[in-house]
Image (tube, rainbow, N blue to C red):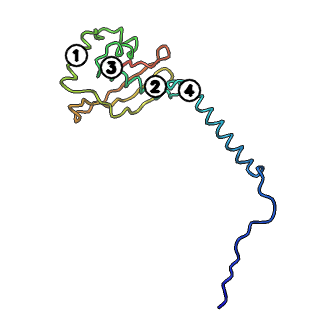
């Protein structure tokens, strides 16, 4: 019986590949590394707030407004309201704000904001519809048209 002879693969004759063949891959790797380092440095140098869009900054102002109410934090609440609201008749005193919000929290639970819709930013003024409810009454949904204005570079809630 004859043996089946299959040829075995042989390395081609000639020199081994030089490092020059890998040069395009080395250059590509260096370029990727430089880009990654540039992005990391940019993120480290620029604060997160500077990288946020205006829409995101408005949403943060609205969130801070409701967070201040949940925490009964009058200073934060006053800071996130615009000057017109803070100076208006009927703006709560610190004592009344804390008392009213603690009672509301005891009775209703925290305020939850499932979504903010119809957000429109036009220069230094923005409008949005804030959908919210209390923890203890999720079936009683509220929708509030809210105006937010930019004062001294910061977004402030001006109606709600």
Q: Residues within 10 Å of mark 1 (few under 14, many from 20)?
A: some
Furthest toward the left, the residue is 107
Separation of disc 1 and disc 4 at Cα? 41 Å
Which residue carries the number 3 mark?
A: 68
Separation of disc 4 and disc 2 at Cα? 19 Å
Which one is in front in this view, the residue at disc 1 or the one at disc 4? Answer: 4
Mark 1 vs 4, N-terminal side: 4
- Residue 147, position as x, y percentages in the image: 39, 22
- Residue 112, position as x, y percentages in the image: 29, 30
Mark 4 vs 2, N-terminal side: 4
Are the residues at dot 2 and dot 3 in contact (C-beta closer than 8 Å)?
A: no
Mark 3 vs 1, N-terminal side: 3
Mark 4 vs 3, N-terminal side: 4
Q: Residues within 10 Å of mark 4 (few under 14, many from 20)?
A: few
- Residue at 70%, 48% in the rendered image: 25
Mark 2 vs 3, N-terminal side: 2
Report the side of 3 relative to 113 (left or right).
right
Which residue carries the number 2 mark?
A: 57
- Residue at 41%, 32% in the rendered image: 118
Report the side of 2 relative to 144 (left or right).
right
Separation of disc 4 and disc 3 at Cα? 29 Å
Q: How many marks?
A: 4
Q: Which mark is residue 44?
A: 4
Disc 1, SS: helix
Mark 2 vs 1, N-terminal side: 2
Separation of disc 3 and disc 1 at Cα? 13 Å
Q: Residues within 10 Å of mark 3 (few under 14, many from 20)?
A: some
Q: Which mark is residue 100?
A: 1
Report the side of 45 relative to 31 (left or right).
left
Q: Which mark is residue 34?
A: none
- Residue 155, position as x, y percentages in the image: 45, 20
């Amino acid at each position: 019986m004859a043996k089946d002879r299959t040829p075995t693969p042989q390395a081609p004759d000639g020199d081994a590949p030089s490092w020059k063949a890998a040069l395009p891959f080395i250059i590509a790797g260096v370029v990727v590394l430089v880009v990654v380092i540039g992005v990391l440095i940019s993120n480290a140098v620029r604060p997160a707030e500077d990288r946020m869009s205006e829409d995101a900054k408005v949403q943060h102002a609205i969130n801070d407004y409701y967070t201040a109410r949940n925490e009964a934090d009058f200073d934060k609440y006053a800071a996130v309201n615009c000057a017109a609201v803070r100076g208006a008749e009927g703006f709560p005193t610190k004592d009344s704000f804390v008392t009213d919000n603690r009672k509301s929290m005891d009775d209703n639970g925290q305020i939850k904001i499932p979504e903010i819709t119809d957000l429109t930013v036009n220069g230094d003024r923005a409008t949005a519809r804030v959908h919210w409810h209390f923890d203890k009454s999720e079936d009683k949904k509220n929708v509030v048209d809210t105006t937010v204005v930019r004062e001294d570079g910061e977004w402030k809630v001006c109606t709600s």
